[in-house]
Image (cartoon, rainbow, N blue to C red):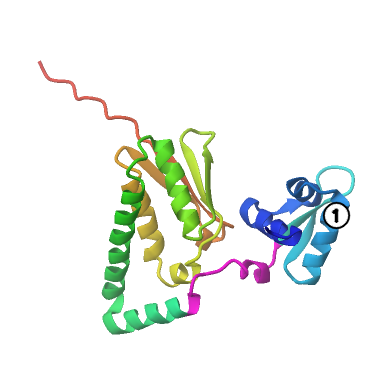
Amino acid sequence: MRTPTERILFQIKTRGPADTVALARALGVSRQAALQHLERLVADGLVEHADERRGVGRPRRIWSLTEAAQARFPDTHAQLTLEMLEAVRAEFGEAGLERLVARRETATARGYTAAMAKAESLEARVTRLSEIRTAEGYMADWSPDPGGGFLLVENHCPICAAAAACQGFCRAELDVFRQVLGPGVEVERVDHLLAGARRCAYRITSSPAPRPRAVAA
């Protein structure tokens, strides 16, 4: 079971910066108790705050994670992965690195397809994809998108260092999602960690069926 401070870190990581009242509500504790935990995290260098003023009255204190806290969420074998990527690039060039990414993409798509075999509806496939990605360390969840379809969110990237060194991993990830969610489904990346967002997010919608062509008389 997570400690209160661990729960605060997880809450901010998965839901984004929040004020003291929102964090207290998420933990089910008083505002004062939440503040004590937050002050302990500040002393440990894991959270920081900024004061946000909205209209009259006292400004709200918004809490966010520091870089040190982000490092507590693992980037799987980051240094080893970077060294291997550089070795592949040096030995086989960019073309060789692209072949490596393509091979990984094919294997990933095959594994995901098998794992999602019994998911018939689009919602079921999105749910299963979220479960698979969470098991792989992406801290994924999904929700209905107000504009229609679904929003798949990945709150952490366990291969962030590798993705930063080789953008092909991000491209391949998007291609895999499009393959395994099936024909007639559009997948759009709307937030990207490497572009400065706090997470990666994907809008998933069913494509409208094409209209049949009119037959000339």
Q: Position of residue 70 (x, y in %)?
A: 63, 67
> Residue beneath label 1, please?
33
Residue, far left? 217
User: Could you tell me the amino acid type at mark 1?
Assistant: Ala
Kindly give the residue lying farthest to the top in the view shown: 217
Q: Quadrant of residue 36?
A: bottom right
**x and y percent of residue 129 in the render?**
43, 48
Query: Would residue 148 be found to the left or right of residue 116 on screen?
Result: right
Between 52 and 96, the one lying in front of the other is: 96
Report the side of 56 relative to 145 (left or right).
right
> Residue 12 at x, y = what percent?
68, 55
Q: Which quarter of the rendered picture does the N terminus lie within? A: bottom right
**Residue 68 covered by magenta stretch:** yes
Q: Is residue 66 above or below residue 110?
A: below
**1 lies left or right of 199:** right
* Range drawn in magenta: 65-79
Point out the image quarter for the C terminus. top left
